Image (cartoon, coloured by chain):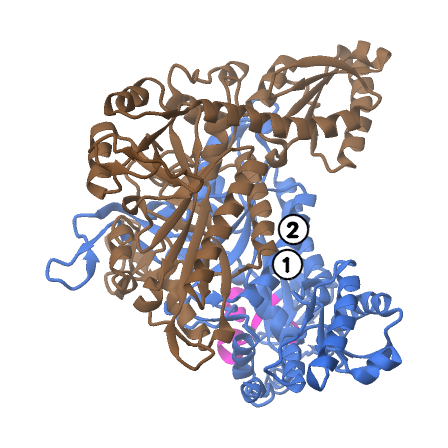
Chain colours: A brown, B blue
């Protein structure tokens, strides 16, 4: 098993294999018997739970409530919003029957042909349609607005090529769906929520992101505007990490949701939706990890401190474990999660490798000499630096380290990301940067879908976003040469 | 709308309609456009979240971790455990296709016949099969045991007659699935978890329950023993509120899950599973509520205190709201959830009715005279008692009241439940009690499935459980007259 731990593919050899190895060997997730569906293992789920809890608090602080809507959506609902049906009603799981029966020929169970549904049900790929069909009954007057609901749920999109966390047929997510009396209020909501995502990425995931608008071609199916947070992975590819959509009155019109305003006039309701998913797990892993394994920001780490006793014989073991136990208690009293590893069937070197693989922020090792001298060996995962420190003041030191590691991981990712934004002004440069350096390419674009599609076909790069803070700057489109008023960010992406 | 609030059907007139009215009018849940699937509305979901959080803590305190397994289960998995297939592989949602396409004849979207799955997928009705198929890869030796996993998830059982929360096609639940090296350890786990459920019901839901074994006929499909908590509703019907199953080696054998024990011998693994669902919402509602609406135990109430200002004109309103605001702050500082109702478009009488309907444990009303005299009117929802109390010391008074209400609701439910357990020794008495009084009937049973089935057919009553604390007592079966060694509890049930 120590050997198995070492068998992490090196990222520079095969990034994609390194990622998959890491997810599986660190115990985060694995493929299941159902094509494209993953099993999220306890260690991976513990990270997701911390993401869930932090996001959920942020949603509630911004006035949102949770609710729950059906897993199934009648097929006909998808046809009601013209763009939405193009984007979502295609690759999806379709329920056609509601009963199995014993095979009369003895071959186990078979689908009962008599139990065919009159109308097929779609396993939700996203819930705008069923939710707006529901909101219709909740909204009569302006006094019923705004509605600020969020749902934590599983969704299914029948992806052909899947990758753990990044693209799976079933995934977990949250989807916010809000209803407003005015266009301005809905736009403000969509902007508020993309900033919540940005703050979550930066403060919890130590992940710098660029906030911007999607180009029309990359918008959510049914949206008038899509805001996105875009992160950069260590292989130079971008990852869309969260989106917030201003849906205009599209779904209100599709499902006939109107309200009486203060003047007694009937108006269609304005909508937003916004979501992040278990894809964030992929972003977290790929942004920070190295060839030794995961690097977790302390705020999302299921275990903050791992303690490994070094000993010969049961007497030494008992003495060291006793001291570690009382240190662990002191740390737990401060809200830190501590694992004292008293396994006697694996060597300490194996344990060290395992905690590095699992990205535990701080590892302590203590032997008989440390006991005598009142010291302990401390290693921080983000820098792999080891030092021998006094046991006295250890709790404060580790509390401080947690904040320092959280910040340091962010700084490192930010420095890398900033070094990977390249301004180019010619098509030649554009292609060269994409092929040699990767990362974000900041370039002028003429604003047309044709050009965007042509660039994608030529280079596989897409417009990741038009950054919110993009400055006015006159220039010429790197592809068509036509005039442009600001730069946008291109990248190859997941 | 005030009229609408009053339109709660009286429980003595039509209990079932009263329940449905209450669920809908209190804003807990409603039926959706998909047959049998409900929408859980924000107020209802807030209660479920509190249940979730409390249970999740209790699971973690007993050493369990959360994980997530696929929504879909290959059809063939159901055939692997003989009893399980009988119980679960029948009324379920079957996914047969993975793509829709535009109708070539222009009729919206249709199922693409080319996208038929080779093997149908079943939307999980429960996850033993997919989980044990996964555990197979997680377990090699005794060192990998025990596995103590829990999953929070949605499941689907295609029920023909559905009722909000009590029986819906899709519902939310948690399912624990544990794997053990020995029979004894698995039995102890199943017992531990039914006691966790009992404690949750009593301490959080203020709901007294009887813990016992199910009779063989009422066991979970695939279990060797099923433990249950049984609660009594105010109409005298029982509600199974949670179950914990000792599964023996049935699933380990079906999915070939073996481990090497300390002596190097291959053994099959022992299993348990246990679950509670959104059905608990139904239990909570039916156990405590009255003709004015919900009665919520404070530990599960989304709003602890509602404050209603009484005033004439904006000046009085401002003065009263200011005082209420500072009282609210003081209560919130103690962790209480407070709603200050400053709506000026509804009368205070309407507000009073609404908070009664929603089961808010304490309602305060304050008018100009209260301002002068330093008092406030306080009503507790459980007893509907009103009194005028000083504002001084109000926070401590309300903190104390929360505990008192939590206990009082339990005491009341317990007194009712205890008054509804009737010992009978003849068939005549048995039928009479069921038809006139209802509740639990404690009677002798000969231990056979035939008798159990005959009693059910004759009376619609089933054996709810063989209580854990049932005393040895010689007697004769009320139906067959054959010898019996202990009493069991019968009831009509949901």
Q: Is residue B278 left or right of residue A307?
A: left
Locate residue A177: give its quadrant: bottom left
Pointer 2: residues within 10 angstroms few (<14), some, or many (20+)? Answer: many
From this viewpoint, is residue B418 visible?
no
Local secondary structure at mark 1? helix
* Image coords of residue A367 (percent x, y): 77, 13
The residue under the point 25% across, 33% down is: A477
Mark 2 — on which chain does it sit?
B
The residue positioned farthest toward the left in the image shown? B105
Residue labelled with disc 2 = B193
x%, y% of residue A310?
Answer: 73, 13
**Position of residue A306 in the picture relative to residue A117 (left or right):** right
**Pointer 1 and pointer 2: residues touching (CB < 8 Å)?**
no
Between B41 and B259, the one nearer to me in the picture: B41
Residue positioned 32% across, 62% down in the render: A250
Chain part drawn in magenta? B439-464
Which residue is painted at 76% across and 77% down in the image?
Answer: B320
Q: From mark 1 to mark 2, how far is it between C-alphas?
A: 19 Å
Outermost front residue: A474
Read off the residue under disc 1.
B50
């Amino acid at each position: 098993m120590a050997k198995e731990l070492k068998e992490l593919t090196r990222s520079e050899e095969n990034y994609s294999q390194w990622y998959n190895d890491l997810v599986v060997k660190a115990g985060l997730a694995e493929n299941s018997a159902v094509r494209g569906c993953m099993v999220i293992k306890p260690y991976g789920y513990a990270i997701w739970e911390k993401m869930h809890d932090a996001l959920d608090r942020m949603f509630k602080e911004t006035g949102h409530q949770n609710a729950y809507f059906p897993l199934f959506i009648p097929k006909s609902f998808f046809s009601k919003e013209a763009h939405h049906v193009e984007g979502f009603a295609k690759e999806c799981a379709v329920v056609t029957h509601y009963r199995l029966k014993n095979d009369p020929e003895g071959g186990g169970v078979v689908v009962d042909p008599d139990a065919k549904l009159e109308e097929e049900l779609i396993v939700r790929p996203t819930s705008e349609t069923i939710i707006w069909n529901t909101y219709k009954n909740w909204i009569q007057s302006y006094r019923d607005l705004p509605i600020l609901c969020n749902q934590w749920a599983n969704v299914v999109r029948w992806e052909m090529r899947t990758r753990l966390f990044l693209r799976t047929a079933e995934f977990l997510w949250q989807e916010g769906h809000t209803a407003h009396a005015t266009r301005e209020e809905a736009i403000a909501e969509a902007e508020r929520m993309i900033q919540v995502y940005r703050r979550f990425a930066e403060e919890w995931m130590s992940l710098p992101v660029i906030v911007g608008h999607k180009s029309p071609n990359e918008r959510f199916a049914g949206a008038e505007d899509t805001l996105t947070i875009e992160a950069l992975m260590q292989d130079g590819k971008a990852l869309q990490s969260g989106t917030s959509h201003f849906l205009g009155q599209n779904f209100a019109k599709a499902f006939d949701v109107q309200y009486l305003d203060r003047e007694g006039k009937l108006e269609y309701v304005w909508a937003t939706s916004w979501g992040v998913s278990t894809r964030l797990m992929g972003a977290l892993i790929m942004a920070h990890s190295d060839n030794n394994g995961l690097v977790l920001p302390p705020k999302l780490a299921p275990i903050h401190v791992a303690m490994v006793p070094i000993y010969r014989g049961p007497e030494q073991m008992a003495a060291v474990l006793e001291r570690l136990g009382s240190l662990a208690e002191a740390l737990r009293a401060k809200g830190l999660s501590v694992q004292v590893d008293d396994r006697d069937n694996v060597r300490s070197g194996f344990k060290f490798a395992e905690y590095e693989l699992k990205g535990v922020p701080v590892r302590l090792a203590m032997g008989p000499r440390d006991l005598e001298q009142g010291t302990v060996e401390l290693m921080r995962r983000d820098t792999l630096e080891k030092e021998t420190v006094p046991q006295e003041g250890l709790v404060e030191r580790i509390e401080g380290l947690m904040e320092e590691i959280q910040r340091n991981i962010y700084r490192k990712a930010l420095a890398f990301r900033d070094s990977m934004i390249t301004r180019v002004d010619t098509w030649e440069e554009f292609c060269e940067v994409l092929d040699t350096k990767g990362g974000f390419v900041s370039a002028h674009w003429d604003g047309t879908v044709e050009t965007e599609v042509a660039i994608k076909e030529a280079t596989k790069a897409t417009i990741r976003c038009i950054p919110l803070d993009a400055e006015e700057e006159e220039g010429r489109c790197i592809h068509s040469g036509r005039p442009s008023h600001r730069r946008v960010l291109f990248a190859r992406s997941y």
